Amino acid sequence: MGAGMIKKKNAMILTIRNMVCDRCIRVVREELGKLGLDVRSVVLGEAVIAPGQHQLDLERIRSVLRSAGFDIVDDRKAKIVEKIKTAVIRLIHHNEKTKQIEINFSEYLAEEVNADYHHISSLFSSIEGITIEKYVILQKIERVKELLKYGELTLSEIAYQMEYSSVAHLSSQFKKVTGMTPTAFKKMTLPGRKSIDLL
């Protein structure tokens, strides 16, 4: 079994970096399918290959995924960091039903990664150079930018949806991260969003 894969109930699990959206899931599934692999599931950050394909050419898989903008994560610590990022992205960008305030972030991440929060927090900081809390703020601001660009919600509604205590709190954090107010950002005609996999 090559690096970058783990065996779970005879299935092979690939940890994949840069998967941040539904389109990413579709592309990874298609690319792995083109290689003739029996793909059982693809979710953010992970693909499960059916049992019985033990002679997989990991370098070929890696090459195909890299050409599509993804990569296989080999290192154990890097896999944990990728799981943390995927969990944060899933909660902030893909979770419209559950209000985030109902979730204790440290408990949520510890459960998602199946490790002690203090351990994963320290590991994340040492590898990424920022704290998990700062990463969460960056992701929240990117989501706020997205909502501002859609123009469907008022700033008050965005503040409520994103669990800010007030519009003033949202505006203050937004300006601290971006250097501009939410109103100024909304008036911009050029896209001001970073790709969330680059945060």
Image: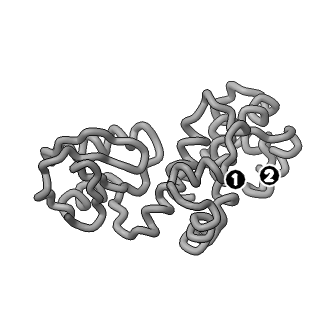
Q: Residue at x 23, y 61 (%)?
A: 63
Task: Indicate which disc, 2 or 1, sits on the residue closer to the N terminus.
Answer: 1
Residue 12 vs residue 136: left or right? Answer: left
Picture quadrant where residue 176 is located: bottom right
Q: Position of residue 144 (x, y in %)?
A: 69, 41
Mark 1, residue position: 137
Residue 104: image location, x then y, percent: 69, 46
Q: How many marks?
A: 2
Q: Is residue 162 visible?
A: no
Residue flagged by tag 1: what amino acid is it? Ile
Instruction: Identify residue for label 2.
Output: 173
Q: Are marks 2 and 1 in contact (CB under 8 Å)?
A: yes
- Location of the N terminus by quadrant is bottom left
Q: Image check: 114 left or right of 13?
A: right
> What separation in Å lies between label 2 and label 1 (alpha carbons)?
8 Å
Q: Identify which residue is drawn at 34% across, 67% down.
A: 74
Identify the mark at residue 115; answer none if there is no mark.
none
Q: Residue drawn 21% across and 50% down?
A: 10
